[in-house]
C-alpha cells in the first residue's frame, strides 16, 4: 500500500467519536467482541459435545480422540490466518475478508446448532477454521489503518480493541457454557451463531459511515495474468486434494489418527520453512540474520508456553468436568465457566503489568528473561494442578480453587510472554518480511497445538501426576536454560532491547 493510499484512509476515517478515538474503532471493537463471543462460547462446550455420550446429547467420541481433535482444530485456526492474510493482501482487501470470514463462522455455528452426524460436525469445523482465518488477522490490521503512524492514540486504540476481545471471551463461556451444558449443546451453539450474526450486522451497518476507506485497499494486488495463474493452481490443488481424500478414506489411509500426524508435521515444517526462507533471502541483511538467530530460541520458548496455556481448553477442561468438585459454596459450577478465568485475569492484570514495566523503565528484564519468566509460570501452573492428586489421591474430587490457581499462574506467564512476543517480533523481523514474521509468531501457537494433539493422548486419571509433572518440569527446565543464555541471545539482537 502506498503512502498516499494510507493518507487517504486516515483522512477518510472520522477521527473522533468512540472514547476519543476514530468511530471506526466502535465498529471493529464490537465486530471482534461478538466474533470472540461466538468462538470462545463454542470452544467452551465443544470438547464436552465431542466426548459426552449420545444419551447426553454428545457425539460419543473417545475422550483422548476428542482432546486431540480439539488441539488440531486450534492449530488449524492459527494456520488458516496465513491464507486469510494473503487473500486480503493480494485479492480483495481486509474489509471483504472480515465480511466473508464472519459469514463462514456464522454458518459453521449454525451447522453445529443442527443435531446431526459426525460428518456435519466436521463440516462446521472447516467453515469456522476458514472463517476465523479470514476474519481474525484482518480485523486487527484495519484497526491499524484507522491511525497515522504519528498518532499518539494508536497504542491506546489497540488496548481498547484488545479489551473487546477479552470481554467477549469472558462473557461467552458463562452464557453459552451454561445453556450448552445445562440445557442443550445445540442451543448453546445456536447462541454462538447469533453472536456472530450480531457482529456481522454491526460491521455491515456501520462500516461505510465509520470506517471510510479503511480495509478497502488491496496492498499488493495480483495482476490479471497472476490472478489467472494463481486461481488455476488453486483449482487444480483443490481437485487433487479432493481426489486424494476420496481415495485415501475408503482405503483406510486417511483416518483421524493419520490426519492428526499430518497436521503435527505441518505445525513444525511451516514455521521452519519460514525461518529458512527469511534467513537465506538476499533481502535479509547480516544484522537481520543475527536477529533471526536470536528469535529462534524465543520462538521455541513460545511453543512450549502455548503448549501448556492452550491445554486450558482441552486437558484442564476435562479436569474441570471429571476431577473437580462442582458443587461448591452452595452453588453448582458449570465446567465451562472455568474458560472465563483466562480473559478475566488478563483484563484485571494487564494494566498492572503495563504499569510495572513502565515503572521499572530501563531496569526491566530483557526480552529473553521475560520469556524465561513466562515459561517458569507456565511450568508452575502444571505443577500446582498435580498437588491435589498427590495429597488427596487420584479418585477424590478436587477443590475448584486449585484449578482457579492454575489458570491464574499461567496468565502471569502469558502477560510476561505474549505482549512482549508481539513487540519483539516487530523489532526483530527483517524489514522485507515484517508482515510474514508476524504470521510466524502466531504459528508458534499452531505448532504448540499440533504438538498437543500427540501429547494429550497420554493423559488419563492414572497418568495424571506424571503428565502434569513431566510437562511442567520440562517448561521450568527450558525457562532456566533460556534465562542462563539470555545475555548471549541479547547479543545476537544487535541493539534491540
Image (cartoon, rainbow, N blue to C red):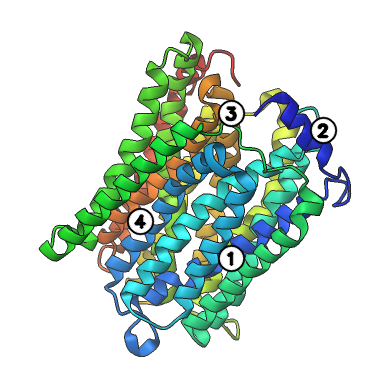
Q: CA distance from mark 1 to mark 3?
A: 29 Å
Secondary structure under tag 1 reads helix
User: Residue 442, image x and y in percent?
Assistant: 48, 42
Which mark is nearer the camera, 4 or 1?
4
Residue matched to label 2: 152
Which mark is nearer the camera, 1 or 3?
3
Does 362 sit above or below residue 313? Answer: above
Front one among 145 and 185: 145
- Going from N to C along the chain, the mark reached first, 4 or 1, is 4
- Going from N to C along the chain, the mark reached first, 1 or 3, is 1
Does 303 sit above or below residue 426? Answer: below
Does 316 sit above or below residue 95? Answer: below
Label 4 with label 3: CB-CB less than 8 Å: no
User: Residue 360, image x and y in percent?
Assistant: 71, 30
Mark 1 Cα-neighbour bin, 10 Å: few <14, some 14–19, many ≥20: many
Q: Which mark is residue 340?
A: 1
Give the residue displayed 67% in from the left and 68% down from the top. 198
Mark 2 Cα-neighbour bin, 10 Å: few <14, some 14–19, many ≥20: few
Q: CA distance from mark 4 to mark 1?
A: 22 Å
Amino acid at each position: 500500500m502506498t503512502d498516499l493510499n494510507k493518507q487517504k484512509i486516515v483522512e477518510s476515517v472520522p477521527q473522533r467519536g468512540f472514547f476519543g478515538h476514530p468511530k471506526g474503532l466502535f465498529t471493529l471493537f464490537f465486530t471482534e467482541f461478538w466474533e470472540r463471543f461466538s468462538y470462545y462460547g463454542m470452544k467452551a462446550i465443544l470438547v464436552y459435545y465431542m466426548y459426552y455420550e449420545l444419551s447426553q446429547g454428545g457425539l460419543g467420541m473417545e475422550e483422548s480422540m476428542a482432546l486431540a481433535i480439539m488441539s488440531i482444530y486450534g492449530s488449524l485456526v492459527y494456520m488458516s490466518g496465513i491464507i486469510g492474510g494473503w487473500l486480503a493482501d493480494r485479492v480483495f482487501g481486509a474489509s471483504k475478508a472480515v465480511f466473508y470470514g464472519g459469514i463462514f463462522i456464522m454458518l459453521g455455528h449454525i451447522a453445529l446448532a443442527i443435531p446431526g452426524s459426525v460428518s456435519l460436525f466436521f463440516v462446521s469445523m472447516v467453515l469456522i477454521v476458514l472463517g476465523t482465518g479470514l476474519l481474525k488477522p484482518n480485523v486487527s490490521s484495519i484497526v491499524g489503518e484507522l491511525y497515522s503512524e504519528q498518532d499518539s492514540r494508536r497504542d491506546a486504540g489497540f488496548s481498547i480493541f484488545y479489551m473487546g476481545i477479552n470481554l467477549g471471551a469472558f462473557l461467552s463461556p458463562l452464557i453459552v457454557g451454561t445453556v450448552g451444558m445445562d440445557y442443550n449443546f445445540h442451543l448453546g451453539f445456536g447462541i454462538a451463531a447469533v453472536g456472530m450474526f450480531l457482529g456481522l450486522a454491526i460491521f455491515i451497518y456501520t462500516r461505510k459511515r465509520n470506517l471510510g476507506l479503511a480495509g478497502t485497499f488491496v496492498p499488493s494486488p495480483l495482476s490479471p495474468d497472476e490472478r489467472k495463474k494463481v486461481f488455476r493452481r488453486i483449482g487444480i490443488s483443490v481437485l487433487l486434494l479432493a481426489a486424494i481424500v476420496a481415495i485415501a478414506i475408503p482405503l483406510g489411509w486417511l483416518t483421524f489418527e493419520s490426519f492428526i500426524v499430518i497436521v503435527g508435521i505441518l505445525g513444525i515444517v511451516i514455521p521452519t520453512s519460514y525461518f529458512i526462507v527469511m534467513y537465506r533471502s538476499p533481502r535479509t541483511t547480516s544484522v537481520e540474520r543475527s536477529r533471526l538467530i536470536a528469535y529462534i530460541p524465543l520462538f521455541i520458548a513460545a511453543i512450549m508456553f502455548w503448549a501448556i496455556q492452550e491445554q486450558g481448553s482441552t486437558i484442564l477442561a476435562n479436569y474441570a468436568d471429571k476431577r473437580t468438585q462442582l458443587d461448591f459454596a452452595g452453588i453448582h459450577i458449570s465446567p465451562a465457566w472455568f474458560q472465563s478465568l483466562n480473559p478475566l485475569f488478563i483484563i484485571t492484570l494487564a494494566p498492572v503489568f503495563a504499569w510495572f514495566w513502565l515503572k521499572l523503565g530501563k531496569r526491566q528484564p530483557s526480552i529473553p528473561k521475560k520469556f524465561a519468566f513466562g515459561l517458569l509460570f507456565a511450568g508452575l501452573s502444571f505443577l500446582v494442578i498435580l498437588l491435589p492428586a498427590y495429597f488427596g489421591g487420584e479418585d477424590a474430587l478436587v477443590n475448584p480453587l486449585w484449578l482457579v490457581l492454575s489458570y491464574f499462574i499461567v496468565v502471569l506467564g502469558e502477560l510476561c510472554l505474549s505482549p512482549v512476543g508481539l513487540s519483539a517480533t516487530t523489532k526483530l523481523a527483517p524489514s522485507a518480511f515484517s508482515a510474514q514474521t508476524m504470521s510466524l509468531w502466531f504459528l508458534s501457537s499452531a505448532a504448540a497445538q499440533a504438538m498437543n494433539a500427540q501429547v494429550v493422548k497420554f493423559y488419563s486419571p492414572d497418568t495424571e501426576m506424571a503428565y502434569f509433572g513431566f510437562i511442567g518440569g520440562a517448561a521450568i527446565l527450558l525457562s532456566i536454560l533460556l534465562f542462563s543464555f539470555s545475555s548471549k541471545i541479547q547479543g545476537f539482537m544487535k541493539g534491540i532491547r
